[in-house]
Image: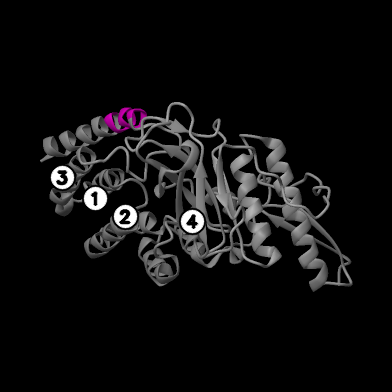
């Protein structure tokens, strides 16, 4: 048995990284004393500061001048679940809590912490989404974890990923604490071994991993890679169908790949099946998904009418967006700023609709 064990933890992996993962070359983080990182100072407080999953969280906010005097404010953001695969699609944000005026000019509200361990990042907005407090671009944060040290370490790794480009010192502090927690767990499980823990989000790409080690929800990528080698789209479709129950609902890209293979094999039933799955999963924004599907299936004469309908539906989706509430609006971006992005998306969708209409 080897006398040294190294554990690699990687936050927010992309699909490319998962398929080209290798051991990082940088040395392990130095182990810090067993204390938690100190959050950045802010004019918003959560109680408790580090809640357990499923508990109730109270928010107290002391507003910036631009937000003072509002009848109501909104805490908007998202909970990032540790170890969830991130394949590069835009994160979704929601109104987590409504904040109403309290004592001394403060605002208060509450919300339930998610049952799964999570790291939350938030901003405070007016109801229209035009005036924002982003905590100086750092966002307000909440660390939620279970009682076990592995759960806590997972959340700290996710936290480090958030701070990587905002404050490298906080990211390093979080990674160091996570490494200490993981080392403690592994040392207890393997008392006769010397344990080293390295946490990095910059894997090298000069070695190919064993694809059998991929998470279950990404096993379908093996079929995709085999198709790239042998071109047998029908066999790949069968493999993707077998993996669908595991990957369904996780936005891993399997539905997009299934539709491409279905179009490639000219299997109309499979085209309809995988197109429907993309629409149900919501790979990207609804209009973006519909335009993408329209472009893919328009190469099949039997589905050009459906492609035109989807492109028209995309335009209707864009016209119906509630800028303040829409989950796709990036955190820290005002409704007006997002309106500019939507205008560009609508122009592109209109161009695709016009192209399909002209093609007959």
Location of the C terminus by quadrant is top left
Report the predominant secondary structure element of the magenta stretch: helix
- Secondary structure under the numbered disc 4 in the rendered image: helix
Identity of the residue drawn at 61% across and 34% down: 166
Residue underneath mark 4:
229
The residue carrying pointer 3 sits among few (fewer than 14), some (14 to 19) or many (20 or more) residues within 10 Å by Cα, namely: many
Magenta-drawn stretch contains 140: no
- x then y, percent, for residue 76: 43, 44
Q: Earlier in the sequence, mark 4 or mark 1?
A: 4
User: Do the residues bearing badges 4 and 3 touch, measured as CB atoms within 8 Å?
Assistant: no
Residue underneath mark 2:
264
Foreground: disc 2 or disc 4: 2
Marker disc for residue 308: 3
The residue carrying pointer 2 sits among few (fewer than 14), some (14 to 19) or many (20 or more) residues within 10 Å by Cα, namely: some
Give the CA separation, mark 2 to mark 1: 10 Å
Is residue 173 positioned above or below 248 on the image?
Answer: above
Say whether residue 12 is visible: no
Give the CA separation, mark 4 to mark 1: 23 Å
Part of the protein shown in magenta: 336-343
Q: How many marks?
A: 4
- Secondary structure under the numbered disc 3 in the rendered image: helix
Identity of the residue drawn at 37% across and 34% down: 70
**The furthest residue to the left:** 360
Foreground: disc 1 or disc 3: 3
Give the CA separation, mark 3 to mark 2: 20 Å
Residue underneath mark 1:
297
Q: Earlier in the sequence, mark 3 or mark 2?
A: 2
Q: Position of 193 compared to 64: left or right? A: right
User: Do the residues bearing badges 3 and 2 touch, measured as CB atoms within 8 Å?
Assistant: no
Q: Earlier in the sequence, mark 1 or mark 3?
A: 1
Q: How is the image coloured?
A: one colour
Residue toward you, 62 or 240 = 62
């Amino acid at each position: 048995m080897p006398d040294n064990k190294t554990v690699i933890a990687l936050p927010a992996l992309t699909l490319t990284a998962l398929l080209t993962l290798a051991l990082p070359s940088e040395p392990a983080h130095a182990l810090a004393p067993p204390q938690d990182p100190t959050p950045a100072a802010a004019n918003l407080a959560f109680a408790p500061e580090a809640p357990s999953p499923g508990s109730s969280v109270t928010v107290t906010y002391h507003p910036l001048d631009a937000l003072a005097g509002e009848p109501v404010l909104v805490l908007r953001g998202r909970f990032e679940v540790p170890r969830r695969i991130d394949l590069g699609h835009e994160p979704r944000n929601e109104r987590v809590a409504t904040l109403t005026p309290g004592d001394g000019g403060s605002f208060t509200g509450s919300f339930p912490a998610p049952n799964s361990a999570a790291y939350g990042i938030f901003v405070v907005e007016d109801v229209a989404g035009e005036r924002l407090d982003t905590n100086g671009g750092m966002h307000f944060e909440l660390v939620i974890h279970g009682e076990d040290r592995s759960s806590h370490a997972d959340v700290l790794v996710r936290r480090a990923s958030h701070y990587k480009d905002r404050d490298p010192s906080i990211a390093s502090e979080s990674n160091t604490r996570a490494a200490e927690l993981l080392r403690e767990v592994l040392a207890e499980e393997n008392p006769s071994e010397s344990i080293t823990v390295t946490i990095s989000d910059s894997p090298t790409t000069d070695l190919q991993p064993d694809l059998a080690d991929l998470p279950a929800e990404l096993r379908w990528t093996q079929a995709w890679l085999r198709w790239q080698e042998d071109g047998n789209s029908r066999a790949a479709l069968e493999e993707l169908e077998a993996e669908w129950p595991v990957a369904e609902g996780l936005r891993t890209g399997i539905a997009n790949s299934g539709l491409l293979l279905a179009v490639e094999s000219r299997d109309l039933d499979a085209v309809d099946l995988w197109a429907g799955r993309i629409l149900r999963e919501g790979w990207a924004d609804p209009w973006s998904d519909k335009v993408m599907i329209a472009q893919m299936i328009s190469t099949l004469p039997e589905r050009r009418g459906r492609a035109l309908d989807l492109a028209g539906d995309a335009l209707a989706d864009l016209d119906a967006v509630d800028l303040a509430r829409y989950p796709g609006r990036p955190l820290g971006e005002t409704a007006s700023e997002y309106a500019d992005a939507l205008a560009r998306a609508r122009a592109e969708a209109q161009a695709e609709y016009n192209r399909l209409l002209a093609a007959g």
